Image (cartoon, rainbow, N blue to C red):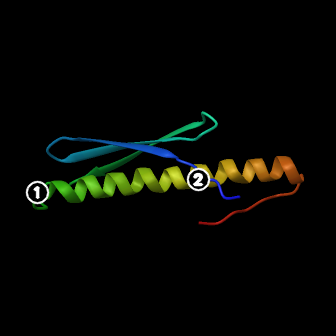
Amino acid sequence: MQARLNWHIDLDIEQSDIESEATATLRLPDATRLTTRGHARRNPSDPEQDRVGEELAAARALNDLARRLLRKAAHEIEEATHAPARPHL
């Protein structure tokens, strides 16, 4: 039997004139919460492109979230198998 699981990721982005900060929070069905942040800063000589800063900050937060989730999974594998685990992206 297949099961459908719902994982929820909240992605909040704050911006100023030259900086974007993204916060990604993953809520798992077992009540685990993983929260990460990503940051982007526009060089003052670059043209204003708000969306680019948002995208960079969000990508960095989500990338860090993926790495943390891999570490969590590796830890759980190691606890069950008592052998090193090295999952890859």
> In the rendering, which numbered label is found on residue 2?
none
**55 relative position to 3: left or right:** left
Identify the residue at the far top of this view: 31
Of the image marks 1 and 2, the number of the one nearer the N terminus: 2
Nearer the observer: mark 1 or 2; the answer is 2
Which residue corresponds to mark 1? Answer: 48
**66 relative position to 3: left or right:** left
Q: Quadrant of the N terminus?
A: bottom right
Q: Residue at x 60, y 33 (%)?
A: 31
Question: In the rendering, at what x and y percent does residue 48 appear?
Answer: 11, 57
Q: Residue at x 57, y 55 (%)?
A: 67
Count of picture labels: 2
Which residue corresponds to mark 2? Answer: 4
Residue 27 visible in rendering: yes
Q: Residue at x 12, y 59 (%)?
A: 45
Q: Residues within 10 Å of mark 1 (few under 14, many from 20)?
A: few
Question: In the rendering, at what x and y percent does residue 30 appear?
Answer: 64, 36
Front in this rendered view, residue 71 or 8: 8
Callout 2: helix, strand or loop? loop
Query: Mark 1 to mark 2: distance in Å?
Result: 42 Å
Q: What amino acid is at disc 2? A: Arg
Q: What amino acid is at disc 1? A: Glu
